[in-house]
Image: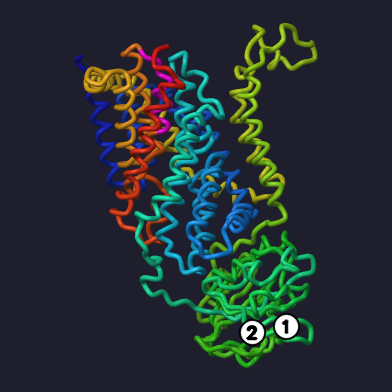
Amino acid sequence: MEMSGQGWFTLAVLAVMIFGLVRFEYVADVIFLGALMILTLAGIITPKEALRGFNNEGMLTVAALFVVARGLVETGFMTRAANWVLPRGDNSAAALRRVMPVSAGLSAFMNNTTVVAMVMPALMEWARKHRVAPSRLLLPLSYAAIAGGVCTLIGTSTNLVVHGMMKTSDAPTLRTGFGMWELSVVGMPIAVLALIYLIYVCPRILPERKEFLEQLGETRREYLVEILVQPGSPLIGRTVQDAGLRGLPGLFLIEIERGAQLITPVGPTERLMANDRLVFTGVVSTIIDLQRMPGLVPAADSTFEVDPAQLRRRRLCEVVVSASSPLVGQNIREANFRGTYDAAVVAVHRNGRRVKQKIGDIRMEPGDTLLLQTGSDFANAHRNNPDFFLVSEVHGADPVRHERSSIAAAITIAMVAMMTLPDVLGWFPLPDRWPDWWPTVLRGEHPPVKWPALLDDMRVIFALLAAGLMVVTRCLSSSSARRSIEWNVLLVIAAAFGIGEAMQNSGAAKVIANVAIDLFQTHFGEIGLLAGVYLLTWLLTELMTNNAAAALMFPIAITAAQAAGLDPRPFAVTITIAASCGFIFPAGYQTHLMVFGPGGYRLGDFVKAGSVMVLLCGVMACTLIPIFWPLRP
């Protein structure tokens, strides 16, 4: 079949795109938008077709889910869940058995990057505490999160990308898109098989390597900090061990002051009581973690904010006292930090020397480093203040909204339930006659109709409503909601729809589809064509982002199915699954890059462990998809 000039031009743009995505995957949004503009200027697609993806429900749903996931993070729900699941002992096999299924289950309902970002710190702390190599745990975590994402419509943005492209397709069997649980008939068996492999086989393949930062011999600045157990804290009555205050990396509990009683050394079975004053040495990251525990507040300064609403307007800053500072020679209690600097002292570091007084009694010396709770403009206001050699804001120290965690969980559960509703009610037809007071949008024009026809398009509304409720109920601020949205991902998704239109309009998709039919179906039959689509999608996923691979393969696969007289729906499912099975190359998936450094991995580790995952997922998908979605319409 001959290709037109527009087809050759589109293929040339596509080739440049693929090269750019392989070489510069971190600017995928720029590459996609650039290709979209070129194809529009060349007249292959109209401006309306180019912009169609920007109001697609798949893209809007992804944006809303970013906000919902952030709400779960900022309320501490994810961290609490991870800490609750981890075992008390040092059995790494038990940790995998408990963490991997939970990670896969969470990934079925929220972005897998978010799941890994929240579970990984807790898993690494557990590994350091029990002297277990993180390399045995982190790569299985990444793989489990990816495997869980193929179980539901909202499990990963790739599912929603394909869902959105199906809704705009001309093929009648694609226009309904995916149901909330439709992918689960193939996704769940894949996830279960993957979990068995990750728990019982993968740790034997992976090496024991120290954490990347430990390999570099990182030196850490330790502070002296006093923590007060507030009345009503959920930690009251729990042992030091169970409360997670003993054995953490970079944190040492020196003593407990209980009224006139001084408890030192502190045993792991010592139970916490209200108004206990705990004295620690710790690095900044562990001090932040202590502040995030419900019912614990720094006790070094009586003016320290404890109200959650006030805390959210405060920041943590590190300052170094200068030789000319009026603070030199004063103790912290006398210095009146609140009145002078609108700040409260949280912790003190003195050049590696152990300070034995209470923090309030410490007389400051030149070079002392103070960790302060400050107003939002402290860093800018005092950056050039001669009282301090250095002023630096501590990032990632925003207080956790523990009191909102149950609300965030309830909103997420309600969203999942409402998005599942069309699947459940799809079995029931609407009545022939509706009451006059029933909303017109639900009565429809031609009853009886199926519930999904009326409710399926509302999935994006449910997601947007959940995102709005996260902000309204103060599970996160509006500024945090805006920051949580990964705009580069949304731009790739939106631009992908226009590029798909260009491949259809130019005839490039049809020519490539015919080549695929000749190559795969002619030699291996209909199942061979399905396997060929899976193979090509998987290869693109390993070379570029999963969303990009799905977007590029969708028009080719659907055209190939239609040309071969096959139902295009199983091919859409194949693309969705294959685009989430990039397990071999670290750059193929963002979660791989997140665990690569902390786990001390090398490319060979991914190849050895990931090859088995690729084989398991590919065989399972190509076996199950034709059973549940017959190839012949």
400 lies above or below 521: below
Secondary structure under tag 2 reads loop
Residue 429 is at least partly visible in this image:
yes
Q: Residue at x 67, y 50 (%)?
A: 475
Residue 31 appears anywhere in the view: no
Q: Residue 55 or 587: which is nearer the viewer?
A: 587
On screen, residue 264 above or below 624: below
What residue is shown with label 2?
Answer: 265
The three-letter amino acid code for the residue at tag 1 is: Glu
Count numbered badges in the picture.
2
Looking at the image, residue 265 sits to the left or right of residue 392; the answer is right
- The residue positioned farthest toward the bottom in the image shown: 329
Rendering coords of residue 169 (x, y %): 44, 19
Instruction: Give the amino acid at mark 2.
Output: Pro
Quarter the N terminus occupies: top left
Q: Is residue 422 above or below residue 94?
A: above
| First of labels 2, 1 by sequence position | 1
Q: Is residue 572 magenta?
A: yes
Please tell me which residue lies in front, 278 or 345: 278
Q: Which mark is residue 257?
A: 1
Q: Identify the image quadrant of the C terminus.
A: top left
